[in-house]
Amino acid sequence: MIINKSNRIIKYFITIVFCLLIIFTKNIQAQNVYIEADQYINTNGNPAFAPWIIVEEGSGATGKRYITYTNMKHVDNYKHSWDGDDKIGGQAHYSFNIDALCNIRIWGRVHCPTPEDDSFSIKILELDDCNWDRINNVDGAEEGFEWVNLAAFGFKTYSNVSPGIYTLIIQPRENFTKIDAFFISTDGKKPDRNYSGKLPSKKPAKIKK
Ligand SMILES: [Ca+2]
Ligand SMILES: [Ca+2]
């Protein structure tokens, strides 16, 4: 009698734990991520950031800063090659964390005044290996900085991305393309138009001993 009662209690307990596990697993949703374009992570071990430059701006750009490039006379018709691995142009590297299995698409906050200043190469190092995508002919950001879905202008979307640390890389192509920020959407939502960015840290990061 006592053994039967104990068995029932154990069964109830296992059932409750199992149900909680299902509910918890279903509710795991990866976090969306904002990246400021000026807060790149290039180090001595990575390609140089230049010819990208950081421009400080009082208003318009998130975090009051954006990146661009203006001195590409050394390349054909002021345009850099689409080949991001040719080692002529610089690269901007950004690290971001995906904390649960998800699909991702990437938005850019850009200002592209004309079709002659609206292109760059892009890839995610861990997902694309050697393949660069080509952002070009960007519509909707002629008058100032606007969020654009880069999937509409040449960048792929990614399905079933596993949790982990990833590296977004961009390389310049046409002069004067202005890039302000990126948004990694993991839930299909658009970036918040009220996002104002974050200023770069004035203090150096503390090193834990
Ligand atoms: Ca910015
Ligand atoms: Ca163009």
Image (spheres, helix red, strand yellow):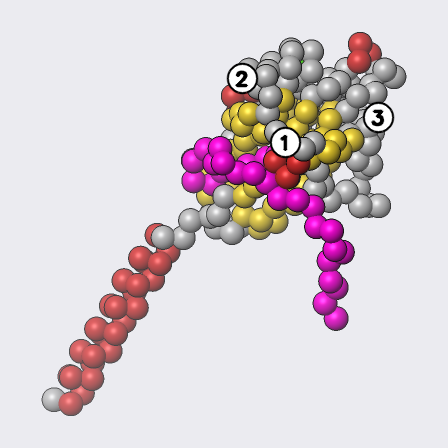
Q: Nearer the viewer, mark 1 or mark 3?
A: 1
Q: Is residue 48 left or right of residue 59?
A: right
Badge 1 amino acid: Ser
Badge 2 amino acid: Gly
Above or below: residue 133 compared with residue 113: below
Q: Secondary structure at mark 2?
A: loop
Q: Position of residue 92 (x, y in %)?
A: 73, 35
Classify 10 Å Cα crowding around label 1: few (below 14), some (14-19), many (20 and above): few
Above or below: residue 158 compared with residue 78: below
| Residue indicated by mark 1 | 59
Which quadrant would the N terminus be assigned to in this image? bottom left
Which range of residues does the magenta coloring cover? Answer: 180-209
State the residue at coordinates (83%, 20%).
Answer: 71
| Residue indicated by mark 2 | 140
Question: In the picture, residue 21 is in which quadrant?
Answer: bottom left
Q: Position of residue 16 (x, y in %)?
A: 25, 68
- The answer to whether the beta carbon of the residue marked 3 is less than 8 Å from any atom of ligand 2 is no
State the residue at coordinates (68%, 24%).
Answer: 178
